[in-house]
Image (cartoon, rainbow, N blue to C red):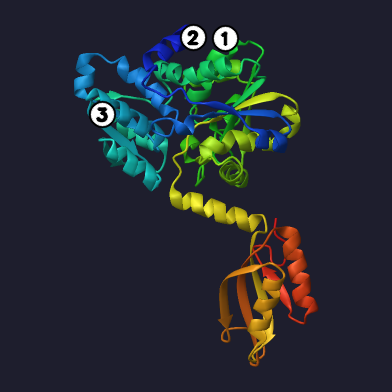
Amino acid sequence: MSVTIDTIRAAAAVIKGKALRTPCIPSSVLSERCGADVVLKLENLQHTGSFKLRGALNKLSALDREKKKAGVVAASAGNHAQGVAYVARSCGIPATIVMPLGTPFTKITRTEALGAKVIFHGETLAEADEKAARLPGEHIHPYDDETIIAGQGTIGLEMLEDHPDLDALIVPVGGGGLISGIAVAARAIKPGIEIFGVQAAAYPSMACALRGEKLSGGGPTVAEGIAVKYPGKITRPIVETLVADIFLADEQALERAVQTLVMEQRIVVEGAGAAPLAALAGNRKRFAGKKVGLVVSGGNIDSSVLASILMRGLVRDGRLVSIRVEITDTPGLLSKVSGLIGDLGGNIVEVRHQRLFQDIPVKMTEVDLVVETMGVKHVRHLMAQLNDAGLPSRLLSNTSDDEPG
């Protein structure tokens, strides 16, 4: 194996003082939730908001003078782009980044702010990378590069220095560069430690490859940082040798993990960074009683996406509901409805009062209210009281009258 504990230790020396030695903190709230002793490696606090800086520092530092002068080119959905752009600017190296169409706006603007030229090409990272490989300059691959892998592997060194008693690590997987480096480092230091990967269910490329299944996947995902259609040629054999299993997390699980880290841990993460928590939450029995390290790989989430996830989470948990109430079209009844909801502890944040376009008698009307509540039990109580008061009501949701949550 060309990536070794020695090359990773050499990378640690290269990036020392340039990349942050991010904290690896215990989480009592996640430990209680998941039934394991959980620690979080907070790469979302890195200079560029992602672990990618480590590999970029190691790679660009190894270029000779002529290659630095000619410039570098990379393909990325955002985090690799920012890592390369950050290091290139600090070293005076021209940088061009090819991004797939649909890359989150926040990652585009941050990359441009770091001085890189941004080109858009293709729907996927693979298509963007094909374009990048044809451009002049040194091609900096996001994961299929031994020097990049060694740089990412420094995370494994740090985690086991901080917590040598770790039983398992869960790492996000796109092309496999991050988990390959971490697995080499961790297994060299502690051979008995188990390494697990997690991919977005929409992009199960590495999992399919390891299981001998036909590669599949595509479409939108909140974890665009690991939306990779094909596993790396260098990374795949490393993962096959050192990784115990790769879990798949669906979109709802990824959203919940982002929401949990923000609301419970007060940590802002992107979908890929939340994937290890989604895997742990979905496999509690497998990790029960073990000390588990989760690699929070990045925090570069678009603010509009984060806002949507948090609001959808409130709806999913029954803390924000839409209620339709049927009343006679007479003065005072809307006040009665709002008064009852208020007396029961609900907070009305939106009212839509329509007399037209409703399939009800002309002297009746339906009122749609968006109400903040304390959760599912509170919603059930509120609905029961409205109906007992002679105000026929029902919840509006994708599943008709189903209860929230």
Q: Looking at the picture, which amino acid does disc 1 mark?
A: Ala
Using the image as rendered, state which of residue 193 and residue 200 is in the foreground: 193
Circle nearer the N terminus (1, 3): 3
Q: Which label belongs to residue 89?
A: 3
On screen, 91 above or below 386? above
Which class describes the residues within 10 Å of circle 1: few (<14), some (14-19), or many (20+)? some
At numbered mark 1, what does the secondary structure look like: helix, strand or loop? Answer: helix
Q: Position of residue 226 (x, y in %)?
A: 49, 35
| Residue where numbered disc 2 is placed | 4
Q: Residue 122: in sight, yes or no? A: no
Identify the residue at the far right of this view: 388
Q: Looking at the picture, which amino acid does disc 3 mark?
A: Arg
At numbered mark 3, what does the secondary structure look like: helix, strand or loop? Answer: helix
Cβ atoms at labels 1 and 2 below 8 Å apart: yes
Circle nearer the N terminus (1, 2): 2
Which class describes the residues within 10 Å of circle 2: few (<14), some (14-19), or many (20+)? some
Q: Position of residue 169 (x, y in %)?
A: 61, 23
At numbered mark 2, what does the secondary structure look like: helix, strand or loop? Answer: loop
* Residue 340 as seen in the image, left or right of residue 297: right
Q: Position of residue 180 (x, y in %)?
A: 52, 20
Q: CA distance from mark 1 to mark 2?
A: 8 Å
Q: Residue 110: in sight, yes or no? A: yes
| Residue where numbered disc 1 is placed | 188
